[in-house]
Image (tube, rainbow, N blue to C red):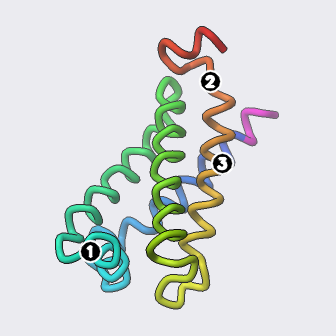
Amino acid sequence: MKKYYILVLKIIIAFILIQTLFFKFTGAQESIDLFTKLVGKNEAYLRIGTGILELITSILLFIPNKTWLGALLTVGLMGGAIMSHLTILGIVHNYDSGALFTGAIISLISGSIILFSHKKDIPILGKNF
C-alpha cells in the first residue's frame, strides 16, 4: 500500500512541476515577470535553467534507483521557490491567488516524504539509516 501512496506523491509533484514548464520555456509574460523580479534583466537564464532542472527532477522521480535524487532535487528547488516567495515575490504573485506558493509547499512536503521513504537508497548515507 505504501508503494501506491508514494506513486501518488510522485504524480502530484510531476504534475505541479511540469505544468509550469510551458510558461518557462515559451517565455510567457507571467514567467518573465516573476523571474525578472528575482534577478533582473537576465531572467532568461534562471527561468530556463529552473525549467530544465524541474524537467529532470520530474523524470528522476520515476526512475527506481534515482527516486531519492528526484526527491532531493524537489526539496531543494521548492525550498528555493518558497524562500523566493517569502522574501521577494510575496505569497500572491501577479494575482495568482497564491497558487504557485501553494504548489511549492505541496511539492516540498511530498518530496520530503518520498526522500524519507527512499533514504536507504541514498549513496553513502543510506547505509547508515
User: Foreground residue, 67 or 42?
Assistant: 42
The amino acid beneath tag 3 is Ser
> Is the Cβ of the residue at disc 1 closer than 8 Å to that at disc 3?
no
- Mark 3 Cα-neighbour bin, 10 Å: few <14, some 14–19, many ≥20: many
| Image side of residue 90 versus residue 30, left or right | right
Q: Nearer the viewer, mark 1 or mark 3?
A: 3
Q: Which residue is mark 3?
A: 110
Residue 10: where, in percent of width, then height? 60, 46
Residue 16: where, in percent of width, then height? 54, 62
User: Foreground residue, 20 or 126?
Assistant: 126
- Of mark 2 and mark 1, the one earlier in the sequence is 1
- Of mark 1 and mark 3, the one earlier in the sequence is 1
Q: Which residue is mark 1?
A: 26
Measured in 3D between alpha carbons, the distance from the residue under mark 2 to the one under mark 1, in whole angstroms, is 36 Å
- Say which element carries label 1: helix
| Image side of residue 50 versus residue 86, left or right | left
Number of on-image labels: 3
Let me know if residue 61 appears in the view: no
Q: Which residue is mark 2?
A: 119
